[in-house]
Amino acid sequence: MRRSTTRKTALTMLLVMILALIPGGVMHSQELMLPQEAGFESVVLTKEQAELFRVFSEVQDLIREYHTKDISLDLLYKGAIRGMMEALGDRYSQYFTPEQMEDWVSDLEGEYGGIGVTIELVDGMLMIMGVFPGSPAQAAGLKAGDVIVSVDSKDMKGRLPSDAAVLLRGDPGTAVETIFLRPSTGELRSLKIVRAKIVQPSMEVKGLGEDLHYIRVMQFSEEAGTSFPLVVGSLRSLGMKGLVLDLRDNPGGLVNVCVEMASHLVPKGPIVELVRKDLKDVIENPEDIEPIPVVVLINGGTASASEILAGAIRDRGVGVLVGEKTFGKGCIQTLVDLGDDMGGVKLTIAEYRTPGGQAIEDEGLAPDYPLTVPEVKIPAAPKFKRILRRGMVGLDVLAVQENLDFLGYEVGELDGVFGPKTAGAVAAFCKAHELDYSGSVSETMMNVVGVACIQKVKDLGDPIKEKGIEILRNRVQSGGWE
């Protein structure tokens, strides 16, 4: 995402609409002359433009004169701009009110109370593009590609990402009722998610031994753009021989940050090709660096700027891609501030291709080493409301059954009835975790069950990461990719 806030650019984009909304602005001539002393300029219009402006002006006058409500020009300006963006038929271009723009910009910086997701408007749907590690959203099992259907009983159809963000955010510790659709399976999931303090992560760095290192980039923020060159430079000075670069669930961000990162990994030459109508612009790394082997981890949440970086690393012969096919967002938007009280627009200005000429939009990048990790659904942790005993029936009993079943204990039918099989499973769990069991389920036991489920998922490991490390070690030792 590129960002521009120049007043001149904003006014240029608004000029046509301003002319259309001049009170009484019926224009038949091809040149409209306005007084210089009033701060206007001479604007030349084609016959077609003049006719369109005449119609638009007539509609404006009809609205302001006959509509039952008093309609301000400010409201009409914003509505007209929103209509222009919608008319593009572009799923990524949109208009922001001042409030929506402020919320959207904050997604690239700062901290807040929420569930920890990034959201884009895709084909009219509010789609999750990224899930922050360690966030409530991740704990609830959400993933990139899920669609927000409703938030606190409010239908999200036809709404903007900023609308959903306002509802999803709130004080840490408070809960939000949500419904999500997983398009890949058609599954609807109703979730109650407790908000937490979200500090938008930038990077995670770990040593792998043998002068190999792991860097996870969560998003291409300004912070990441500052930190990444310093980290890579430091690791190079210490003799780094290879890198596992984790771009999974990275929804993208600032393209200039992506290009800066790429310039520290690929040698002198092309990083990405930008295509706009008949124009092509190749962005290159001007510095001739000594590349090191890079294994890039990818999945369906790897999108936009992440795909630019992954494509550059592979096409320039620096590394390979491991994991699952990427999202396929192959276009770049610029954010334009329209000035005082007008908000802004996010406008698609180019499509991009990898240095090898591969288009990404709707296609994505296929991994060189495909590896799909089966989805693991963690049941919601049981919440203590009462001490449970045999013969009791309720949703709290069902929650205990679901958790024990997930852990591999035989609880019988998941029916919310505390019967003999459930009692046997509880006794077995307590014995394995050295808990006292006297025939009832205490608050302590419920808490331990919830933690055990989370630990089970952690113990499953990260097969894609492990495979990436294996491939990198083989590359460093043998001098070639498998």
Image: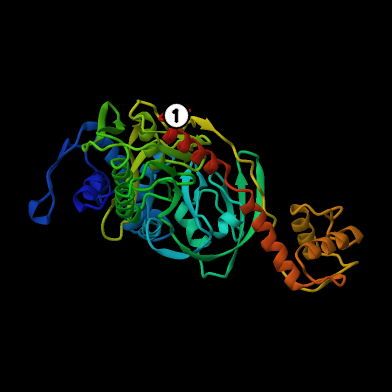
Number of dots carrying numbers? 1
Residue located 70% across and 68% down the image? 447
Residue 280 is drawn in which quadrant?
top left
Residue 86 is drawn in which quadrant?
top left
Image vertical order of residue 334 relative to residue 195, above or below: above
Residue 39 lies, in percent from the top left, at: 12, 54
Q: Secondary structure at mark 1?
A: loop
Residue 216 lies, in percent from the top left, at: 44, 49
Q: Is residue 477 visible?
A: yes
Residue situated in front as seen by the camera: 337 or 404 = 404
Image vertical order of residue 187 relative to residue 325, above or below: below
Q: Which residue is mark 1?
A: 481
Residue situated in front as seen by the camera: 35 or 28 = 35
Q: Residue furthest left?
A: 37
Residue situated in front as seen by the camera: 86 or 328 = 328
Left or right: where 9 falls relative to 376: left
Residue situated in front as seen by the camera: 49 or 79 = 79
Residue 139 is drawn in which quadrant?
bottom right
Left or right: where 80 falls relative to 14: right
Residue 201 lies, in percent from the top left, at: 43, 57
Q: Is residue 123 visible?
A: no
Q: Residues within 10 Å of mark 1 (few under 14, many from 20)?
A: some
The kind of residue on which mark 1 rests is Trp
Residue 261 lies, in percent from the top left, at: 32, 44
Left or right: where 308 falls relative to 30: right
Colouring style: rainbow
Residue located 21% across and 38% down the image? 287
Left or right: where 311 falls relative to 397: left
Q: Quadrant of the N terminus?
A: top left
